[in-house]
Amino acid sequence: MNFALSRPGRFIGALTADLRTVGYRLAAALLICVILTVASDAFLTANNLLNVLRQASLLFLLASGLTLVIVTAGLDLSVGANIGLSACIAASVMKLTGSALLGAASGVGVGLCIGVANGLLVALMRMPPFIATYGMLWVVHGITFWYMAGTTIYGFPAGFRALGSGYFLGVPIPVYLMFVFLTLGAFFAQRTTYGQEIYAIGANRESARLSGVPIARRLILVYMVSGAMAGLASLVFLARMNSAEGDIGEAFTLPAIAAVLIGGTSLFGGVGTVSGTLVGALILTLVLNGMNLLTLDASWQPLVTGIIVILAVYLDTLTRKRAEARN
Amino acid sequence: MNRPPATLAGVLARVPGVAWILGLLVIGFSFFSRDFLSGPNIHNIGLQSVILLILALPQTMIIMTEGVDIAAGAVLTLASVVLAWVLVHGGSLPLALAASLATGMMFGLANGMLVALLKMPPFVVTLGTLGVAQGLALIVTDGQSIVVSSDALQAIYNGEIAGLPLPLAIGVAVYAVSHGLLYHTRFGTYVFALGGNPEALKLAGIRADAYLIAVYVLGGLMAGLAALILTARMSSGHPTSAIGMEFDAIAAVVVGGTSFERGKGWLFGTLLGVVAVGVLRNGLNLLTIPSSAQVACIGLLVIVAMLVDGLKGRR
């Protein structure tokens, strides 16, 4: 994938390679669908499938920004905590002002600020990304709990709630959002100089620097995008749940990272696509949905997601080793 | 291999960073709260810090190998749940402790093998095992507390050895053992080398992988041991009791001056870091600042410490 634009022939080759990796994963998703159809009568119903799509779209919104971060060989562990704070601030602003628009803007704004803070720590202070964002996780988490002090904010305007629970032509609105941001993300990553520079940073930071890529600014940009996407995801979640509590973000970190890794993005940087992450989010949601249908308790979710993350990292490491052996 | 000298002069030369923080915290809190420097409160800080110390010491070694174990809090939680479960189902305390240690060791072994043999990045691997441990704790308990009424367990928390509360004595023993391991054995030398120059170890024909696994196993075992004190303190095993505690431990290590990047570590610094985090939490408690805001303060403390570390490294 790296430096695909340097030659047209290679670009087409890289595109088909991308389609292939996404294709494998789509086939896996279909296989899971077939298994679940056989295993449970409740799976292949319009309601359940729309539900899966809606959950996957929320996860995708969160994971799409994270994908870009991981492409730069970084990591953003604060996305879950970010959802929590963004949702709570958005909820609180909406209650105070009665304006859905102001609430939504402040939610995305909070997410964006957290992202910028991450970016500054990583790019300017040169902290290892996982440490910086891990520290940020707890800072944001602490602020959220302190701000909410155990209270719940609920009941939002119907117009806002449509963002998470509304339908258009029988399809949930978050699903449209998913495809909008898939298109935007894919275009940004594959067709803009910014996107190519981000891949270059992940593939080989030193050579990217020597080719004149402004590393610090691009890094701040990706963390900012990741933060803003978490803010946006928090709005969809808030609109769906119609209530905000301090702990709502906790359950998101692991699934978001899992979706990105299942989607074929490498932790080592330089490799990965937003469309892969969409399929990753779909696969993870299908697995969790299947567990739910087979009446496995929700307690099993962190266990299964944890195992999936470990397996995905293992495959990633294996692929990288093979690639190194080939070179 | 930047092994700091374990001499008094060497120690004194490196004290400032942590000591400054600790000194400022102590002076600040004793100014704002009259109870802070009272005997019972100091006793309290000690007792509260022991679990953190037991987690932070092996975490120091793991971070020195340029790794990290963010599953430690979840593994501690699971071990505590297992310990309580065995006690409630009629097992003796030694059996329960063995089960708890075994739980910790298994997770340490899994982490170590994934990192050392399969060369997987430690941060994400332990994030995965964190999910596994937390999930298991939820499944075993069904989300409820397992309440234990065991005199033997109570004796662990309230007992004394030569005037020293038993938990503190355990803490001292763990520190002594860790110090001995890190500074006076071949294992310790290799831990320094794993972070500084793992290639050199391999060229010298040393099985670096085995030592790396051992470091993570030690971390797991210590989480199992800490579970004993935690369960005794709460008289129960709860599926979320120590979730996030690894962050306090990592904070203590980082504040104590151990670096994530250069294989530099310092056990005594971690001890001071643990006391600093303990003092910070205790003092904020006395000022009735909610524990959620305390977490944010510790997060800031870490980021500041990392910044200082980064600035020092650039010079």
Image (spheres, coloured by chain):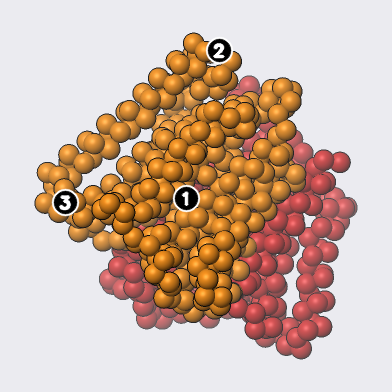
Residue on which disc 2 sits: A7
Mark 3: secondary structure: loop
Toward the viewer: B93 or A128? A128
Task: Depth check: give the residue in front, B51 or B98.
Answer: B51
Colour applied to chain A: orange
State which tag comes first along the sequence, 1 or 3. Answer: 3
Give the spatial CA distance, label 2 vs label 3.
46 Å
Q: Amino acid at mark 2?
A: Arg
Dot placed on the residue nearer the N-terminal end, 2 or 3? 2
Q: Choose top left, top right, bottom left or bottom right for residue A310.
A: top left
What chain is the red one?
A: B
As helix, strand or loop, the secondary structure at mark 1 comes to helix
Q: Which residue is mark 3?
A: A45
User: Of marks 2 and 1, which one's residue comes earlier in the chain?
Assistant: 2
Badge 2 and badge 1 both on one subunit: yes
Disc 2 or disc 1, which is closer to the eye? 2
Q: Are discs 2 and 1 less than 8 Å apart at CB?
A: no
Residue B17: x and y in percent read 82, 58
